Amino acid sequence: MSTTTPTKRQLKAAAHHLNPLVIIGQQGLSPQVLKQIDGRVRDHELVKIKLAIEDRAQRKRMIGAICASLSLELVQSIGKTATLYRKAGPDENEGRHSVLTLRECRRA
């Protein structure tokens, strides 16, 4: 899954006001944490997570593992915060609008 540069720009703008929904501590990734991230992404499509880990390389590896295991795309990573995105499937999108659709409506 790869988004275009304009789409990433829209996602970054949409995520600007968001607070991290999941905080990953020193214990690292566990199946419960992955399940929590997956649930938040299913609910919101675009989420921020915070990794309370000092080692930059370890944070980068952990973000890569999260993205790979949950089919997410990294929108941006700044410091200890990462913004992740996965377009909702037709069955997940019932009764709500896509993040990108809402962003386009606000501009009009």
Image: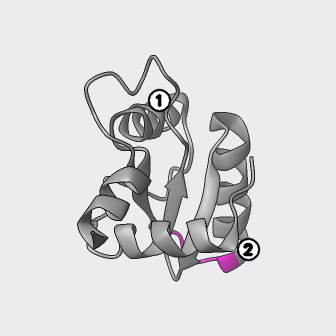
Determine if residue 39 is in view.
Answer: yes
Q: Estimate how packed mark 1 is, as few (under 14), some (14 to 19) or many (20 or more) residues with alpha carbons within 10 Å.
A: few
Q: Is residue 32 left or right of residue 102?
A: right
Nearest to the observer: residue 40 or residue 26: 40
Distance from disc 1 to disc 2, alpha carbons, whole Å, reads 23 Å
Q: Quick check: 5 above or below 38?
A: below
Residue situated furthest front in the rendering: 108
Magenta residues?
52-56
Question: Which x, y percent locates residue 63?
Answer: 64, 58
Question: How many marks can you see?
Answer: 2
Question: Which x, y percent locates residue 76?
Answer: 57, 72
The three-letter amino acid code for the residue at tag 1 is Lys
Please report contact status of discs 1 and 2: CB closer than 8 Å, yes or no: no
Question: Which x, y percent locates residue 44?
Answer: 35, 43
- The residue that mark 2 highlights is 57
Please tell me which residue is depicted at 49% across the width and 58% down the height of the picture.
Answer: 26
> Who comes first in sequence, dot 1 or dot 2?
1
